[in-house]
Structures are given as C-alpha cells and as structure tokens.
Image (cartoon, rainbow, N blue to C red):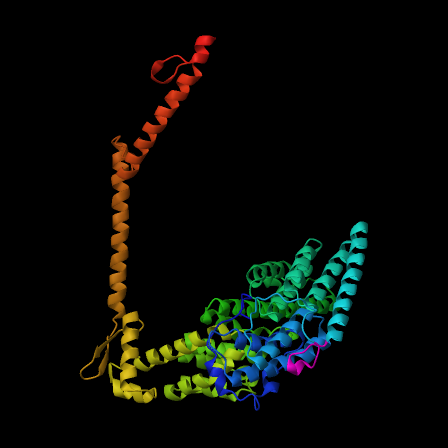
Amino acid sequence: MSPKGEPLKVSIGALDELDPDTFDWAAYRGTYKGRALITRLAAIPTLVLSSKTKPSQKALALARAAALQAIPVLKAETWDTQLYGRLCRQIEATLTGATYDESMEVDEGEGRAGPEAEGGRDVAWVAEASAAAKQEHQRLQVELNGYLSNLIKESIRLSYLSLAELAIKTGHLGEALKSYSQMREYSSGPAHQVQLGLGILEAALMFNDTTPLAGNISKVDASLDRLHPVSSTSSSAVQVNEDMTATQLAASRENVARSQAVRRSVTAKLRVSRAILALADGSYATAVRELANVEDEGGLGDWEGAAISSADMAFIAAMGALASQSRGYIRRVLLDRGSFRAALADRPWVIDLVTAFVDAQYGAALQLVQQAQPHMLLNPWLAPHAEDLAKKIRTRALVQYLEPFASVRVAAMAEAFNTSEDEMMAELCKLAEEGTVDVRIDAVDRLVTIRERDPRQEAFQGGAKTGQDIANTVQTALFRMRLKEAGVVVDPTPPQAKESRKEWWREHRGDRSDRDRSSHGVGAGGAPLLGALSS
C-alpha cells in the first residue's frame, strides 16, 4: 500500500533479480514485530499484484512467500480477519493467475476452507477471532458507558485507549484514530496529550499511513514544550538556593535529568515522524536531515521494530542522501558515524554503495543502485519513490562528476558511467535542456564544456536588479501621493470592467424602474395598472 492508503502501482521488473528460494527473510524481517511486521510482509503481495506491469513467476512466488510469512504472525497476535482474508485471496491469485482487485469488498466469511498455502482459509480461526473481537468490544463498551454515567474522567480516558488498542488489533486504523480523538477530550494535562499523540503517530507508522502524521506532530511538539520546556532540560536550570540541602539538590538534578531523557526520547520519535512525512512528500533532503539526528536524541527506544527499525532508517537516509546531498555531507553525516554502519550490519552493500558514491566511483555506485532497486521496492516507505530516487541519484552523480572540470570528453564520461557515447550524449543534452547542468556540448568533437559561473558578477547583477525594483516602487508611491495632494483621483478599474458595470447598471436600472412603478400602481410606460383603477 502507498502511504496514502491506496494500492501502489509501480514497475516491479527489478524484483526479477531476486530469487524467492534464497531470499533472506530473516534480514527482511529484521527487528520488526507485531502489527508493523505484518504490514511490512503484507505490502509485498499487494505491490506485486497491484503493479502496472504483469508480474513474472519469480515476483508471484516472492509475493506468495511473503503472504505465507505474514499469516502465522497475524493469527498469533491479532484478530484482523479482514487482512487475513485478503492475504488468502492474494495467495490464490498468485497460484491461479486470476486478476486481483484491491478495492473489492469481500465478506470475512467468504472463501473456501483449506490449506492457506493453496489459497484456502482457516475458517475456524476466522470464526473464533471474530467472536473474540466482538465480545471484547462489547465488554469495553459496557465499561465505558458505566464510566460515562459516573463521570470518572481518568477511567473514561483509559477505556477509549483500550478501544483504540482493540481497533489496532482488529486492523481498523480509522476506528483507532476515532477513539484517540475521543480520548483527547478527557486528557487532563500535557503528559496525557503527549502520550495520546505518540500513540497516534505509532499507529500510523504501524499501518504505513502518513495521513495522520502532519496534524499530530505539531500537537505533540506543543504539548512537549509545556511538559518539559527547553530551558529546563539543561543542567544549568537547577537553581541552587542557600536553604537547599544536599538531598534536595540531588533530587532536583535527578528531576532535570529525567525531564531531559523524556524530551530526547519524544523528540527522536517526532524526528522519525517528520522524516517519514517528508519522504512521502518527496522531500528527501528534509527526511535525511531528520533521520540523521535521531541517534543523537537517543534512538528509537520502544519504537524499535514496533513502528520502524534502525536498519530501515539508515537505508532511507542513505538513498535520500545520495539523491539530494553533496559528497561531503554524506561522508560527515553517514559514513563517519558508527551508528550508521552498525544499523546496516545486515546490509553491507548499502555501505559499499555510499562509499563508492562518496569516493567518486560513479560507475560502481550506479551498478549498486541498480542492485538496490528491488530492495527499495520491498521497502514500504521507499517503494513509491524507487524509480525517482534511482533517477535523481544518477543525475546527481553526473552533476558532481562535471564539477571539477572545465571541459571533458563524452567518451571519458561514458567510460566512467559504464554506458555508450550516444546514450551519454542524449542524457547530457536532456539535462542541459532542463537546466540541471550549465554546459555547452560540441556534437562534432563530442566535447562538453562547463560554463564557469562568476559568483561576484551574479551577486552584483542580483543587487542591481533589487535596487531597480525598489526605485520603481518608490517612484510609483511618490507619484500616487502627488496625485492625491493635487486632488486627482484615478479610478484603477480596468476599462473592460467599467463597460460591463455600465451594462449591468442599465439593465438593472430598467428593472428597478418597472418595480417602482408597479409599487405605485403605474405600469410600464406610465400606464395605470388595473388594480389601481379598480381601487
């Protein structure tokens, strides 16, 4: 599914490079658990069966294996019969080759009984899970009604929290958000507001849905400032009075340290949420900047694997940085940090890719980008941007390759990027037309000349233009002021508007004159009305 909750339609040809029989499912699962793991595994069959191209047998086998991996976790930890039925239908579609429509509404009880590996359903589990979910919902609703009758505020808040957790367990994110919203009315302080906001953000990340993120990030941030102000998180905020004992001073410092730890933990989660939201909007630089500072705030904490994993954060940061940042920034923010390398211990090829790009080995780096495309498609957050990221990484490599040169031959560039001269010429011409690179291309000698920029001249021209604009604005204001002092009023209405206004006035003035005559007993043309004569 896409972050917006709609079926994702991308080209999945890169998945043919993966062998379903030797695919490392343990590395793909990583530290994910619970609902986040189920969503991650269920995204693969949805991606394959909803693609805009016909999936190959390898892709279908990979989708079937992912669905079969997700079902045991789903049955053990949730009562989500709707997702279970969808996974079974997807398995059946991969076996029969039938058309799969994500938007089809299928009743939970439909489907044939039989082994799940053959597209059948565990009918007994479906009935048991549905009954358990219904019974739990009724129990919580009865408790909530009792608390509402007695106006027990804290118990009402906790009841809505339990209903939200039940909705997540049954796979209904919308119902969970509704319960969270009702819970907000019974929250009594910023601590409750922070807990509520983090619950919404975590639930949204569990379901790979970025829609609730934007509005709740700002609310959590504001509540956090009230709960743990920025000034109170510094060690200097502890004010020592002469009357304070050593015990009181130690307790005060402990409170400040605790406040600092809580603020850092919440800030790290807010950074992750902002990064995922920026990634969904295609703002790769912002996503990288937020993710790069998560470890400085203490890491994911209890969100590790429950909402997102450190390995996925490092992978997203690496691909986003290659597409949007300079080599110096990538080296400083990613390669020079031990936490980045530690997070990608199971994916050493990502470190090789970043290292090759930073070392200007663009041919090797772009080959690794091609190898990374299937892994980007299998990542629910990167899948919508896989093609765009690969394109922008290649464009950035070309731009950075040209930076140190005054001129370079197309043959040398083609050799560096492992492509033909004709393809390189076509690519350079396209980039020049788009304005991405400022070059002059000699098609005869196949020579690319980089136009040198003069920052001082550009700054001078920009300043001169700004000064001229200010002078024009001042002259216009002075002229208008002199006209006003002389008693000259200029109607700013355009001539066309004046004519249309005059026509409207003529038409409506005639209608109004007729109405006035009618009200005085006079017809059109001054003739008296019959009603007036009879009276």
In percent of width and height, residue 55 lies at 50, 80
Quadrant of the rendered image containing residue 479: top left
Q: As rendered, which of 241 and 448 lies closer to the eye?
A: 448
Instruction: Point out the residue furthest to the bottom here.
Output: 22
36 falls in the magenta region: no
In percent of width and height, residue 20 lies at 56, 87
Quadrant of the rendered image containing residue 120: bottom right
Quarter of the rendering occupied by the N terminus:
bottom right
Q: As rendered, which of 421 and 113 lies closer to the eye?
A: 113
Q: At x 66% / y 57%, what residue is drawn?
A: 181
Q: Is residue 333 visible?
A: no
What count of labels does the image hold? 0
Could you tell whether 2 is left or right of 526 in the image? right
Q: As rendered, which of 409 and 122 lies closer to the eye?
A: 122
Q: Is residue 390 visible?
A: yes
Q: Please tell me whether residue 456 is drawn above or below residue 469 in the rendered image.
A: below
Q: As rendered, which of 255 and 331 lies closer to the eye?
A: 331
In percent of width and height, residue 317 lies at 50, 77
In percent of width and height, residue 91 lies at 61, 79
Quadrant of the rendered image containing residue 38: bottom right
Q: At x 25% / y 71%, what residue is drawn?
A: 454
121 falls in the magenta region: yes
State whether the magenta stretch is mostly helix, strand or loop: loop
Q: Please tell me whether residue 95 is drawn above or below residue 484 in the rendered image.
A: below
Could you tell whether 478 is left or right of 330 in the image? left
Q: Which residues are magenta?
A: 113-122
